[in-house]
C-alpha cells in the first residue's frame, strides 16, 4: 500500500535537503553530507515537553450497563506512579590516545518516570431524573523515557570529569555511530581485545522536565424507569497536546431488568504542537481524530451471576506517531564499488553507519475490541469474583489479549479487601523494529552513499513491540460512618518481552517495572445529607459555618465532640506584573543587570570570562494552583483535629530579552529549558496536621489557638531537563534544579501556630487572626530553607440573607528571604578535580628525558588548576541559574492585601447544607526582597460540608 | 448454562455444537508477514464466535430471576465496577503503556504521558 509519507517527516527531510542545496526530494538523501554533519543534524531531540505515544482515548464511553443506582457523591483521589530505574548498559569511549575503544558501564544518573496525579469528581442529582457528573483530573510527570533504540556499543560517551571518589563521570551521546551487522542485521561490536562480539540493544533515554496535564469533563444523564441517555464532553490540555472530546450513550433495560443493553459513541479531536527541534523542524503541528463506538450487553444469569459482553470499534486518523520518538537506521557499507569495501567486511559482518529519523506511523488505525466479564457471587464467603477477558485487534498487526481477575471480599465493619491480578500480551506492530536497515549504493561522486527510500512506516517505540505484562495489586477500602469511604490501592506492574503469549517477544533491554499507589476519599452525599437535613435547622448550619473569608485558614473549630467536617479549598495565585525592587517598579534592563549576581559574562575584546554578567532569562508570569483537603474531627468539645493534604501545581512562563543575548552568552541560558519556555511542576505538597483548641466560646465571641505542624511531603528536588550548551549537551544527566518557587513544598518540618478570634452580633460578624510559619530546619534535602512567615488578618462580614453573606478583609503578611541555597556546582556534572599527586614530578627542562631535579610539588601549576576548576564550576553554576528566581535573595517581602469575599450556604435543593465561599485578594502594597515580579492577586474558593 | 433454572438442558458445549459453529474456519498458515486479509479472517472468526456465544447465553437465560431473588446481585461487591475511580486510573496507566489498551480505556484523555 503506497501511503503518502507523513508531512512533518517529509518537511524535515526536504528542509535538510534544501539546507544543503539538494533537490527538494522527500527521500533521506545523505549525499554530500559528511558523516559528522549527518550525525549532528539527525538527532538532538529536545525533550522539554516530551509526550508519550500511546494515546488514551478520552472517549468516556458508557461502560456501566447496570441500572444507575448511583448516589450523589464527591470524590478526591491522589495517585503516584513510579517506574524502576532502567539499565543504562555500557557505552564506548575512544581511548585517550585514540588507538582503541574502551567500554564503560554507564551509570544510571537519571530519575525514572514518575507521575503525581490528583482527581476530584462530583456527581449530583439535579432533579430526580437528571444527574450531573463532573471530573477534574490533573497529572504532572517527569523523568527519563526512551527516545530511540540502538546497539549498546554504538553509543559513544563523553567523560565529563571525575566524581568525589575519582571515578569517571560519563554520559552517552544520543547519537548512535558505528556497528557491524551480520546477514540477519544483528549488531556486533569490537571488544577491547579487538574481537567482534554480538551486541545487544539498549534504549537511549532522555530526561524530561516536569509537565502537567489537566482535564475537565462532564456528563449529563437523564434517567427513565428503564432507560437512560447521557451526553458528555471534556477537554484535556498540556503544553504540546490538546484533546477535546464529546460522547453520547444510552442504556436500555428489558426482560424485567434482567438484561441491559448499552451503546455509546465518542469523538475526540486532538492537536499536537510539539517542540521537537529535529533536523530543521522546530515545531511539529498535527491533528488527530478518534471515533470510538461500543455496544454492550449485561445479563443476569442466575441469582449469583452476571455476564457482561462488549464489542468496541475505534477508528483513528491523523498523526498517530509520537513526535519525541526516533528510529535508528543503519546503512551497510557493503557495496563492492566502495573503496573501503575490503576493510569494512569482516566475515559476514559489515560495518554500518547510523542515523536517526523521527518515527513514522500510518495515518489510519482501526481497532476492534471484544470483552467478556463474568461476575460470580461466592455465597459462603459473601465475596464476588470478577473475571474479565478482552481481545483487541487492529490493522497495525497488534493483537492483544487481556485477562484480569478480582476477588472482592468484604470483611465486616466496613472493610473490603480486593486482591487482583492482570495479564496482558500483545504482538508487535508490523512496522516495529528495534533498529532498521536502509539500503544504499556507493556513489563515487558523492560521499559516501546514496540511500534508498526509507520504508513508509517505522517505529522503535517499545509499546509497539511484542511483550507481555503481569501486574498484581490489592485494594483496601473502609467505609466509615456517615457515608465516608476511604479507598487505597497499590499495584505492581512488570513489562517483559519474555512474558509474551506464545513467546517471541522483544529482548530484555525493553523490560521495565513500575508501581502505582492511590488513595481516594468518597463522600456519599445521599447518606450524609440525611442526618444533616433532618437534624439541623438552617440556623444550626450557620452556626457551624461562621462567616470566615475563604482565604483564611483555621478560621473555626467544630462545635461538639463527634462532629466531622470535610472541605475542599482551592487557591490560585497570579504574578504577572511589573518587575519590582523593594516597593518600586524597575525596568527590564535594571533587573537583568542586577538581579542575578555572579552570572557569567564573556568579554569579547579581552577574551575573558567575568562573573558580573546579567540574567539571561526573565519571568513573564507565574501562576500557582493549590488544592487542599480540610478533614476535621472533634474528639472532644474543646479540641478539633485537622488534617490538610495539599496538591499543588505551578507554571512559569520565561522569556529571553533581546538585550540579554547581546550582553552575555551567545545562546540561551544553562538549564536548556529555562528560556523562552514554560516551566511546570506539580504534585503532592506539604501535609499539615493541626490541633485547634477552643479558649473561649460564647454566643458572641469565640477564641481558639491552633498548633500546627507541616510535614515535608512536597518534593523539593525537582530538576529541569539536562544539557549544557558548551559541553555538547549530553542528554542523559538530570539538569539544574528548577526555580526555588517551583518546588512543591518547603522541604522542612514547619511549625504553624495561629490565634483566631471571631465575633458575631445579629447580621454582623468580624474576626482577627495572627498566624506564623517557623521553619524548624535551616536547610532541606536540596540545601535551602524557605523564609519564615508572619501573617495577620482583620475582617468584617455582613449576612445579606440567611444564606448569603459578604466579607471584607485587610491582610498583612511578611515572609523572609530563602536561607541557604541549592548546592553549587552540579553533583553529577563536575569538572575533573585537581589532584596534588598529579603535580609531584621532577623537572626536565632540556627535554632529554633525564630529570634535572628530584621530584617536587609544583604549587603554582596546582593553584592554576584549582583556579581553572573553580572558574569552570562557577561558570556551570551560573549557567544553571539564568533568572532572578534562581537566587534566594529574590524571595519574600512585605505584602498588604484587601480581600473581597462572598459566601453561600445552600438552604435547600441538591446542595442543601453545602457552603461555598470565594474571596479575591487584591494586592495594595508590595515591598519585595531583592528583585521580583509583582503580584496580580489571588483567588480562594472553599467548599465545606459538615455532618 | 444451568439446568436448575428450568431451561432445556443446554450447556456451553451443546451451544458450540449447534451447527452454527461448524462454519469451517481455516487458519491460514502462519506467515511472518501480517496482512490485512489475515486480520479480516480473524475478525470474521471472532465476530462469529462472539455473536454465537451471546445467542447461546441468551437462550440459557430464559428462566427469570425475580427481583426479590436478586439480593446477592445488588451487593456492592457485585457492581460491574466496584472501584470506578481506581479503574479509571488503572485504565489510564495501562493505556499509556500498552498499544491495545486504548480500546477499553474509556476514561481519561489526552496523551498517555508516561
Image: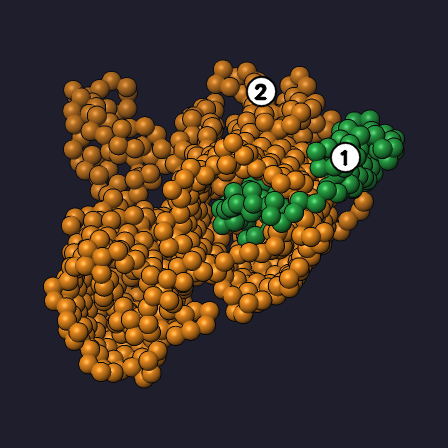
Q: Give whichever of A78, A547 is nearer the camera.
A: A547
**Crowd around label 2: few <14 · some 14–19 · many ≥20 (10 Å):** some
Which hue is chain B drawn in?
A: green
Q: CA distance from mark 2 to mark 1?
A: 29 Å
Q: Is residue A853 positioned above or below A38 on the image?
A: above
**Crowd around label 1: few <14 · some 14–19 · many ≥20 (10 Å):** some
The percent position of residue A135, horizontal first and vertical second, equals 50, 59
Which hue is chain A drawn in?
A: orange
* Label 1: chain letter: B
Q: Give whichever of A777, A216 is nearer the camera.
A: A216
Extreme residue toward the left, this view: A695
Which mark, by number, is residue B34? 1
The percent position of residue A265, horizontal first and vertical second, equals 68, 57
For mark 2, what is the residue?
A: A198
Q: Looking at the rendering, which quadrant does residue A253 occupy?
A: bottom right
Residue at left offset 27%, top offset 28%: A165
Residue at left offset 22%, top offset 49%: A748
Amino acid at each position: 500500500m503506497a501511503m503518502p509519507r507523513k508531512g512533518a517527516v517529509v518537511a524535515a527531510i526536504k528542509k535538510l535537503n534544501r539546507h544543503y542545496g539538494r533537490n527538494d526530494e522527500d527521500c533521506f538523501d545523505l549525499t554530500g553530507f559528511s558523516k559528522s554533519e549527518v550525525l549532528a543534524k539527525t538527532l538532538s531531540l529536545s525533550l522539554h515537553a516530551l509526550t508519550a505515544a500511546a494515546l488514551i482515548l478520552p472517549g468516556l464511553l458508557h461502560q456501566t450497563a447496570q441500572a444507575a443506582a448511583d448516589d450523589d457523591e464527591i470524590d478526591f483521589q491522589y495517585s503516584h506512579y513510579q517506574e524502576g530505574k532502567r539499565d543504562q548498559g555500557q557505552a564506548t569511549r575512544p581511548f585517550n590516545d585514540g588507538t582503541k575503544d574502551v567500554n564503560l558501564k554507564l551509570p544510571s544518573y537519571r530519575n525514572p518516570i514518575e507521575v503525581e496525579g490528583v482527581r476530584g469528581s462530583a456527581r449530583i442529582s439535579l432533579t430526580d431524573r437528571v444527574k450531573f457528573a463532573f471530573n477534574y483530573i490533573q497529572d504532572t510527570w517527569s523523568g527519563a523515557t526512551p527516545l530511540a533504540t540502538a546497539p549498546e556499543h554504538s553509543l559513544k560517551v563523553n567523560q565529563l570529569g571525575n566524581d568525589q571518589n575519582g571515578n569517571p563521570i560519563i554520559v552517552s551521546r544520543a547519537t548512535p555511530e558505528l556497528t557491524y551487522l551480520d546477514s540477519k542485521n544483528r549488531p556486533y561490536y569490537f571488544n577491547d581485545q579487538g574481537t567482534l562480539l554480538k551486541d545487544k540493544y539498549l534504549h537511549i533515554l532522555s530526561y524530561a522536565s516536569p509537565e502537567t496535564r489537566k482535564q475537565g469533563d462532564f456528563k449529563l444523564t437523564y434517567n427513565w424507569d428503564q432507560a437512560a441517555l447521557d451526553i458528555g464532553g471534556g477537554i484535556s490540555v498540556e503544553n504540546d497536546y490538546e484533546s477535546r472530546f464529546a460522547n453520547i450513550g444510552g442504556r436500555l433495560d428489558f426482560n424485567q431488568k434482567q438484561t441491559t443493553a448499552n451503546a455509546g459513541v465518542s469523538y475526540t479531536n486532538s492537536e499536537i504542537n510539539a517542540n521537537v527541534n529535529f533536523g530543521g523542524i522546530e515545531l511539529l503541528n498535527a491533528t488527530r481524530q478518534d471515533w470510538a463506538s461500543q455496544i454492550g450487553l449485561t445479563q443476569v444469569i442466575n441469582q449469583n451471576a452476571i455476564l457482561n459482553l462488549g464489542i468496541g470499534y475505534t477508528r483513528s486518523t491523523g498523526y498517530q506517531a509520537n513526535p519525541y520518538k526516533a528510529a535508528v537506521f543503519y546503512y551497510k557499507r557493503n557495496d563492492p564499488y566502495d573503496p573501503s569495501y575490503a576493510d569494512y567486511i569482516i566475515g559476514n559482518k559489515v560495518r554500518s553507519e547510523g542515523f536517526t529519523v523521527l518515527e513514522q506511523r500510518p495515518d489510519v488505525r482501526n481497532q476492534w475490541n471484544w470483552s467478556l466479564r463474568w461476575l460470580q457471587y461466592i455465597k459462603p464467603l459473601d465475596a464476588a469474583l470478577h473475571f474479565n477477558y478482552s481481545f483487541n485487534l487492529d490493522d497495525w498487526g497488534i493483537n492483544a489479549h487481556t485477562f484480569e481477575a478480582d476477588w472482592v471480599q468484604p470483611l465486616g465493619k466496613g472493610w473490603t479487601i480486593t486482591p487482583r491480578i492482570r495479564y496482558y500480551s500483545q504482538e508487535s506492530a508490523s512496522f516495529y523494529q528495534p533498529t532498521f536497515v536502509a539500503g544504499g549504493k556507493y556513489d563515487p561522486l558523492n560521499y559516501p552513499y546514496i540511500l534508498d527510500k526509507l520504508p513508509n512506516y517505522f517505529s522503535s517505540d517499545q509499546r509497539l513491540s511484542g511483550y507481555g505484562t503481569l501486574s498484581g495489586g490489592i485494594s483496601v477500602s473502609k467505609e466509615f460512618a456517615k457515608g465516608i469511604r476511604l479507598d487505597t490501592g497499590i499495584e505492581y506492574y512488570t513489562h517483559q518481552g519474555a512474558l509474551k503469549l506464545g513467546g517471541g517477544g522483544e529482548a530484555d533491554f525493553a523490560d521495565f517495572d513500575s508501581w502505582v499507589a492511590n488513595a481516594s476519599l468518597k463522600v456519599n452525599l445521599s447518606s450524609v445529607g440525611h442526618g444533616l437535613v433532618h437534624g439541623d435547622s438552617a440556623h444550626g448550619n450557620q452556626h457551624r459555618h461562621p462567616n470566615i473569608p475563604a482565604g483564611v485558614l483555621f478560621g473555626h473549630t467544630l462545635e461538639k465532640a463527634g462532629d466531622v467536617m470535610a472541605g475542599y479549598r482551592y487557591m490560585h495565585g497570579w504574578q504577572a506584573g511589573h518587575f519590582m525592587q523593594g516597593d518600586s517598579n524597575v525596568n527590564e534592563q535594571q533587573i537583568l543587570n542586577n538581579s542575578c549576581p555572579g552570572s557569567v559574562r564573556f568579554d569579547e575584546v579581552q577574551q575573558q570570562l567575568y562573573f558580573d554578567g546579567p540574567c539571561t532569562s526573565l519571568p513573564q508570569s507565574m501562576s500557582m494552583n493549590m488544592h487542599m483537603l480540610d478533614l476535621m474531627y472533634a474528639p472532644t468539645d474543646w479540641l478539633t483535629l485537622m488534617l490538610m493534604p495539599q496538591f499543588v501545581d505551578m507554571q512559569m512562563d520565561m522569556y529571553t530579552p533581546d538585550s540579554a543575548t547581546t550582553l552575555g552568552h551567545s545562546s540561551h541560558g544553562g538549564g536548556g529549558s529555562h528560556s523562552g519556555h514554560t516551566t511546570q511542576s506539580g504534585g503532592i505538597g506539604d501535609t499539615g496536621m493541626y490541633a485547634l483548641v477552643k479558649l473561649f466560646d460564647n454566643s458572641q465571641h469565640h477564641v481558639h489557638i491552633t498548633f500546627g505542624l507541616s510535614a515535608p511531603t512536597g518534593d523539593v528536588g525537582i530538576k529541569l531537563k539536562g544539557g549544557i550548551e558548551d559541553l555538547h549537551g549530553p542528554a542523559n544527566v538530570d539538569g539544574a534544579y528548577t526555580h526555588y518557587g517551583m518546588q512543591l513544598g518547603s522541604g522542612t518540618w514547619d511549625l504553624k501556630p495561629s490565634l483566631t478570634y471571631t465575633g458575631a452580633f445579629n447580621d454582623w460578624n468580624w474576626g482577627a487572626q495572627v498566624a506564623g510559619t517557623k521553619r524548624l530546619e535551616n536547610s532541606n534535602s536540596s540545601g535551602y530553607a524557605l523564609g519564615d512567615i508572619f501573617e495577620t488578618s482583620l475582617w468584617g462580614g455582613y449576612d445579606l440573607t440567611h444564606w448569603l453573606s459578604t466579607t471584607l478583609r485587610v491582610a498583612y503578611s511578611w515572609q523572609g528571604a530563602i536561607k541557604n541555597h541549592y548546592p553549587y556546582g552540579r553533583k553529577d556534572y563536575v569538572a575533573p578535580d585537581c589532584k596534588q599527586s598529579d603535580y609531584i614530578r621532577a623537572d626536565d627542562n632540556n627535554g632529554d628525558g633525564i630529570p634535572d631535579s628530584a621530584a617536587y610539588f609544583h604549587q603554582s601549576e596546582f593553584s592554576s588548576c584549582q583556579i581553572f576548576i573553580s572558574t569552570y564550576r562557577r561558570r556551570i553554576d551560573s549557567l544553571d541559574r539564568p533568572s532572578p528566581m534562581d537566587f534566594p535573595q529574590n524571595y519574600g517581602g512585605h505584602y498588604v492585601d484587601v480581600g473581597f469575599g462572598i459566601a453561600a450556604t445552600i438552604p435547600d435543593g441538591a446542595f442543601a447544607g453545602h457552603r461555598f465561599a470565594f474571596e479575591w485578594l487584591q494586592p495594595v502594597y508590595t515591598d519585595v526582597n531583592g528583585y521580583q515580579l509583582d503580584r496580580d492577586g489571588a483567588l480562594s474558593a472553599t467548599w465545606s460540608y459538615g455532618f | 448454562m444451568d439446568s436448575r433454572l428450568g431451561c432445556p438442558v443446554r450447556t456451553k458445549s451443546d451451544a458450540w455444537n449447534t451447527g452454527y459453529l461448524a462454519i469451517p474456519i481455516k487458519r491460514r498458515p502462519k506467515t511472518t508477514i501480517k496482512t490485512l486479509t489475515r486480520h479480516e479472517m480473524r475478525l470474521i472468526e471472532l465476530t462469529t464466535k462472539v455473536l454465537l456465544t451471546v445467542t447461546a447465553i441468551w437462550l440459557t437465560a430464559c428462566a427469570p430471576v425475580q427481583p426479590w431473588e436478586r439480593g446477592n446481585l445488588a451487593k456492592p461487591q457485585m457492581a460491574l465496577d466496584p472501584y470506578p475511580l481506581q479503574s479509571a486510573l488503572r485504565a489510564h496507566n495501562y493505556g499509556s503503556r500498552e498499544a491495545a489498551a486504548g480500546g477499553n480505556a474509556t476514561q481519561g484523555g489526552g496523551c498517555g504521558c508516561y
